[in-house]
Image: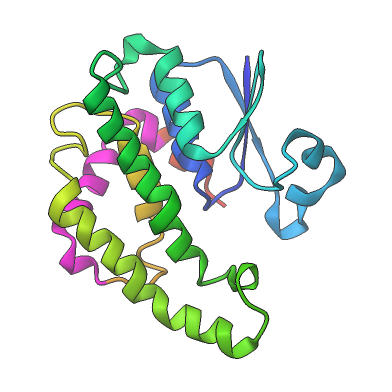
Amino acid sequence: MYKLYYAPGTCALASHIALEEVGADYEAVRLDFKANQQNSPDYLAINPKGRVPALVTDRGVLTETPAILTYIAQTFRDAKLAPSDDPFALAQLQAFTSYLCSTVHVAHAHKMRGYRWATEDSSFADMKRMVPKSVGAGFALIERDMLRGPWVMGESYTICDPYLFTIGQWLDGDGVDLAALPKVMAHRKRMLERPAVRKVVEEEKV
């Protein structure tokens, strides 16, 4: 059995959905970030980064959303959550998940994690002011050039989709104009029609 450590409202939602989609035998363990449980000695022994998600497997612990999603897709190949037999398409998929991880998520983090990059209160305030613009620009690119429809990679549902859905859940709080993202919003609606997504979203409610 796999064990997934997550916290509500985090990027761990994507891995949680993927595990549910493939029918994996797993246990989801909720961490209380308000109680700083992610920095407890017990959890740091599992994931020294003090972040989620962390997936405990029979071969060890995996961290970082793109890596966990790829592992799930490659382990449960019958679910066809990645084009494993097409190197170019697989690289395109990885380019998308990498963009969410390295650019869009980082832009979002400037709203509440400014201490990672600066020490002055004025710097924190400036970072927060930039979030609607920086996150909005990232999603404008996704809307225009990356989201093929009906799913990210086109007709096939892949690990890109729960990841986009997860990051897209933060748009409202980031002050991004949702009306400018009709394809992204249609994707969100489509995702919520999937039983696995509805189940996990309900389980992760705060």
Query: The magenta stretch spans which residues?
Result: 177-198
Q: Residue 179: within the magenta?
A: yes
Residue at the far bottom in the pictured view: 122
* Drawn side of residue 163 relative to residue 92, left or right: right
Q: Main secondary structure of the magenta part?
A: helix
Residue at the outermost right position: 41
Residue found 53% across the figure and 42% down from its top: 12
Q: Position of residue 192 (x, y in %)?
A: 30, 41
Pick the quarter of the image with the N terminus: top right
Q: Nearer the viewer, residue 92 or 126?
A: 92
Mark count: 0
- Rendered position, 121 above or below 56: below
Q: Residue at x 49, y 16 (%)?
A: 24
Left or right: residue 58 compared with residue 73: right
Whole-percent x and y of residue 13?
48, 41
What residue is rendered at 33% in x and 9% in y? 78
Residue placed at 26% from the left, 34% from the top? Answer: 92
Give the x, y percent position of residue 95: 32, 40
Side (left or right) of 96 relative to 200: left
* Vertical arrangement, residue 205 with respect to residue 174, above or below: above
Residue 175 vertical position relative to residue 169 in the rendered view, above or below: below
